[in-house]
């Protein structure tokens, strides 16, 4: 293996039989720290830069970006400008999954600007690069002067054929029933992200423990890098001592517990802000000088946080009066909107989510222009969090990282129970709009999505529900703690953990864990999964009262889709030159038609009659007509010697005047006219592919359609030998034998057969009157027909 980017020093470990490499020394020399991470032929450059401290802010200004370069797979971007634009969904998720385990390990009160960037330099399109990012970020911070309580590593895990596999390939992820990403320090798990196919909680815990072991190996590798490249950590300005201010705030708020708990009832920080203003006002009224409003607001929030947490730990009562394992009031409804394909409204406490399902045809699938293999996406879930959901007045913006992350979490949870495209050939889009928020809207979106899918008639394997669990501890080491079920928004903000678990009655389909602690309490995972399962089943009971099973059919306004399988060699016949044929069918029927290389034709549209007409035309263009089959179709043209009948769209056959009826016919118009629907039987297909039909013999047949079964001989209707039918006599212009039927029949089958036939095809002409005594144009006894003239035998295929 070549040295990545000509790095001057590399550190390696064997992980799952493949070399994991950290390289340093050459690339990005102006960054505060930089390294490359390589696994297989996937190479990620991770850089660190810092800025000046930002005094007065109440958050840590850490920014993490993940940049995908399309040159890494030897591809030019497909955008108009042929360059990368804003990060895609996968890059956004990679940045979030790096930020979440890194952020808690910086010391509290550290306000220096920090920017970490992961740039994908090369990809073998087998080993994903996003799972390497956390390790690179931890490495560069560890060898920099910035204070950090690492190392921390992350690993993606799959389960293929019952065996866990770290850093799986894209192909292995497709086969796996679990996609788990775990970030862990030497002491504890600090982040989990998972999508699973209804696996039991015990299996998931086993996978997390396996991933922890891999993380410890990678942490040890980072320590080798730190030993050689680490530098002295910087001194940084810690927050000023505010003990006097805290005492003053406690004095003002002493005995105001009712007001304190009222301030944390709603979503967001408006109640906390109001309490801060209240304290400032009291201080100013009391004559306090030089009031630092920011410091007062921050310390007031800290006082409220301590008060709320203390009541939970000491009394087992939450800010809104609930017990730790109590869920807020639940409600579920379906069919709440007209004309949409499916809708579900889910509410838990003040959190209300409306999800709408839309079913589309194959052409509605999303094209993917990304590093990962795969070109199309058949299922999408989009999550919106408008400002009015929390009572705020601010401009609407395009989806941010939070919206993308929440939407993808719900997508993972639901995707596990969706039917395969072969069984339900629809592209599915779910849109979850948060109408009111007070905690765990992503899990509300999961519940609303299940309701909308069932209302739309999507045959999901099982309904899915989600719940958010919280944690309150007495200190960073979690010597005393309390687990909370169904956390409200303020409990998420003031608590130590947000643990989201979604699944069915059978098992888990999605997990997301974020903590603000250095480590989780011992034996914590089993208890939190057990509590989450109890809550999930309680929510499912409420949802199933609204709709117990998916509707049997898709809605009135949803497209109707039929799949037709044709011989791939006949795709050209359906498309036609320059798309002329397929576009004509679409224009005539209003249906959409999408053809795959394997011969699968997806025909869809809101009008069932239009879809049926398009199906018939496609089948007509590709159907192999067999002798003995019976059809019903319109008379398209009339000639003096017979009538042409359209037996399939675009395919005509001719009924000779002698085959119109058993009795003698003088004029074709005496029996049929253009536009008449007639039943005909295929009696001959000549060596030029021309189809001869009979109305006489069709009258003796049963149902119209293509017969079941395959080819093979079949007695003609009526049974037995039809006996000697006499000599048919010579036909005009050619004697007894029909002679050759040469000549061009035109570009389209079923074209005009008119014109002279003698000596090379053409018009059969009227039969001499001497052939059939009793009238002009008639004939006498036809005589026996040679068996080779009209081979008998049933057709193949299905009846329609």
Image (cartoon, grey):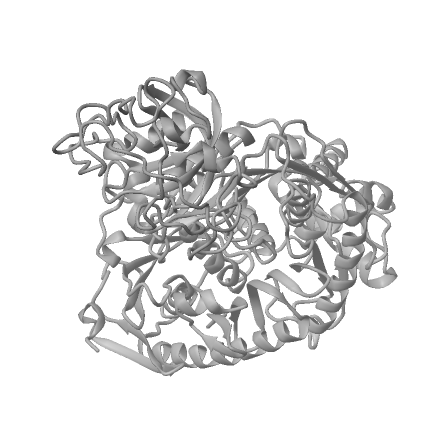
Up-down relation of residue 51 to residue 224 (above or below): above
Q: Is residue 176 visible?
A: yes
- List x then y, in percent, for residue 575: 30, 37
From the viewer's perspective, is 196 left or right of 721?
right
From the viewer's perspective, is 387 left or right of 98?
right
- List x then y, in percent, for residue 643: 36, 24
Q: Is residue 56 visible?
A: no
Up-down relation of residue 42 to residue 687 (above or below): below
Name the residue nearer the viewer: 756 or 637: 756
Name the residue nearer the viewer: 287 or 56: 56
Q: Residue at x 65, y 71 (%)?
A: 520
Name the residue nearer the viewer: 546 or 725: 725
- List x then y, in percent, for residue 446: 65, 49
Count of residue discs: 0
- List x then y, in percent, for residue 58: 56, 47
Q: Quadrant of the N terminus?
A: bottom left
Q: Residue at x 36, y 70 (%)?
A: 143
Name the residue nearer the viewer: 778 or 652: 778
Asked where in the image residue 513 lies, by quadrant, the reply is bottom right
Up-down relation of residue 245 to residue 227 (above or below): above
């Amino acid at each position: 293996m070549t040295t990545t980017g000509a790095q001057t020093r590399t550190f390696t470990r064997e992980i799952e039989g493949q070399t994991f490499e950290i390289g340093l020394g050459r690339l990005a020399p102006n960054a505060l720290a930089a390294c490359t991470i390589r696994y297989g032929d996937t190479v990620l450059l991770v850089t660190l830069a810092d800025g000046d401290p930002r005094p007065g802010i109440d958050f840590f200004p850490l920014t993490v970006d993940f940049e995908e370069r399309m040159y890494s797979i030897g591809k030019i971007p497909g955008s108009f400008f042929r360059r990368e634009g804003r990060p895609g969904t996968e890059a956004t998720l990679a940045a979030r999954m790096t930020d979440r385990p890194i952020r808690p390990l910086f010391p509290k009160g550290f306000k220096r600007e920090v920017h970490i960037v992961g740039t994908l330099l090369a990809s073998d399109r087998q080993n994903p690069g996003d799972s390497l990012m956390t390790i690179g970020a931890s490495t560069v911070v560890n060898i920099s002067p910035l204070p950090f309580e690492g190392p921390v590593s992350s690993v993606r895990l799959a389960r293929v054929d019952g065996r866990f596999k770290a850093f799986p390939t894209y192909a292995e992820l497709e086969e796996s029933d679990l996609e788990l990403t775990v970030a862990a320090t030497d002491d504890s798990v600090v982040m989990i992200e998972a999508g699973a196919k209804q696996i039991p909680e015990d299996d998931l815990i086993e996978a997390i423990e396996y991933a922890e072991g891999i993380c410890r190996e990678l942490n040890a590798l980072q320590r080798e890098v730190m030993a050689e490249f680490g530098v002295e950590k910087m001194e940084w300005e810690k927050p000023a001592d505010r003990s006097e201010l805290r005492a003053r705030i406690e004095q003002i708020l002493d005995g105001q517990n009712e007001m304190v708990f009222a301030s944390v009832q709603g979503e967001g920080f408006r109640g906390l802000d109001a309490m801060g203003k209240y304290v400032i006002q009291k201080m100013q009224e009391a004559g306090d000088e030089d009031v630092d409003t920011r410091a007062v607001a921050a310390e007031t929030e800290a006082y409220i946080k301590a008060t709320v947490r203390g009541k939970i730990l000491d009394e087992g009562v939450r800010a809104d009066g609930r017990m730790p394992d109590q869920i807020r009031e639940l409600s579920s409804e379906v069919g709440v909107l007209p004309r949409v394909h499916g809708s579900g409204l889910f509410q838990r406490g003040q959190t209300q989510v409306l999800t709408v399902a839309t079913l589309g045809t194959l052409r509605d699938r999303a094209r993917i222009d990304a590093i990962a293999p795969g070109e199309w996406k058949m299922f999408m879930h989009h999550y919106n969090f408008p400002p009015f959901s929390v009572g705020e007045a601010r401009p609407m913006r395009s989806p941010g990282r939070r919206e993308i992350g929440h939407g993808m979490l719900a997508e993972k949870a639901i995707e596990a129970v969706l039917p395969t495209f072969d069984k339900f050939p629809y592209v599915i889009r779910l849109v979850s709009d948060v109408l009111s928020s007070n905690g765990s809207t992503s899990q509300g979106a999961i519940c609303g999505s299940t309701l909308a899918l069932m209302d739309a008639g999507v045959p999901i394997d099982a309904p899915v529900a989600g719940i958010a669990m919280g944690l309150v501890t007495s200190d960073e080491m979690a010597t005393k703690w309390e687990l909370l079920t169904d956390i409200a928004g303020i409990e998420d903000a003031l608590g130590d953990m947000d643990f989201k678990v979604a699944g069915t009655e059978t098992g888990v389909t999605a997990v997301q864990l974020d903590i603000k602690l250095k480590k989780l309490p011992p034996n914590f995972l089993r208890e939190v999964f057990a509590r989450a399962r109890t809550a999930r089943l309680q929510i499912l009971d409420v949802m199933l009262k609204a709709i117990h099973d998916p509707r049997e059919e898709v809605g009135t306004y949803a497209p109707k889709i039929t799949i037709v399988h044709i011989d791939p060699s006949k795709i050209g016949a359906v498309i036609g030159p320059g798309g002329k044929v397929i576009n004509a069918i679409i224009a005539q029927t209003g249906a959409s038609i999408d053809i795959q290389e394997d011969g699968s034709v997806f025909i869809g549209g809101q009008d069932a009659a239009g879809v049926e007409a398009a199906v018939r035309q496609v089948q007509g263009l590709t159907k192999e007509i067999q002798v003995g089959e019976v059809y019903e179709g319109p008379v398209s043209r009339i000639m003096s010697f017979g009538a042409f009948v359209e037996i399939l769209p675009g395919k005509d056959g001719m009924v000779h005047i002698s085959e119109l009826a058993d009795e003698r016919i003088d004029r074709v118009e005496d029996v049929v006219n253009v536009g008449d629907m007639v039943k005909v039987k295929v009696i001959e297909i000549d060596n030029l592919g021309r189809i001869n039909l009979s109305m006489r013999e069709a009258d003796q047949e049963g149902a119209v359609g293509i017969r079941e079964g395959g080819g093979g001989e079949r007695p003609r209707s009526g049974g037995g030998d039809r006996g000697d039918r006499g000599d048919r006599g010579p036909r005009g212009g050619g004697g007894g034998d029909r002679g050759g039927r040469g000549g061009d029949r035109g570009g389209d089958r079923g074209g005009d057969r008119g014109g002279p036939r003698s000596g090379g095809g053409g018009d059969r002409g009227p039969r001499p009157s001497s052939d059939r005594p009793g009238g002009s144009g008639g004939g006498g006894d036809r005589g026996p027909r040679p068996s080779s003239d009209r081979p008998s035998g049933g057709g193949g295929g299905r009846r329609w």
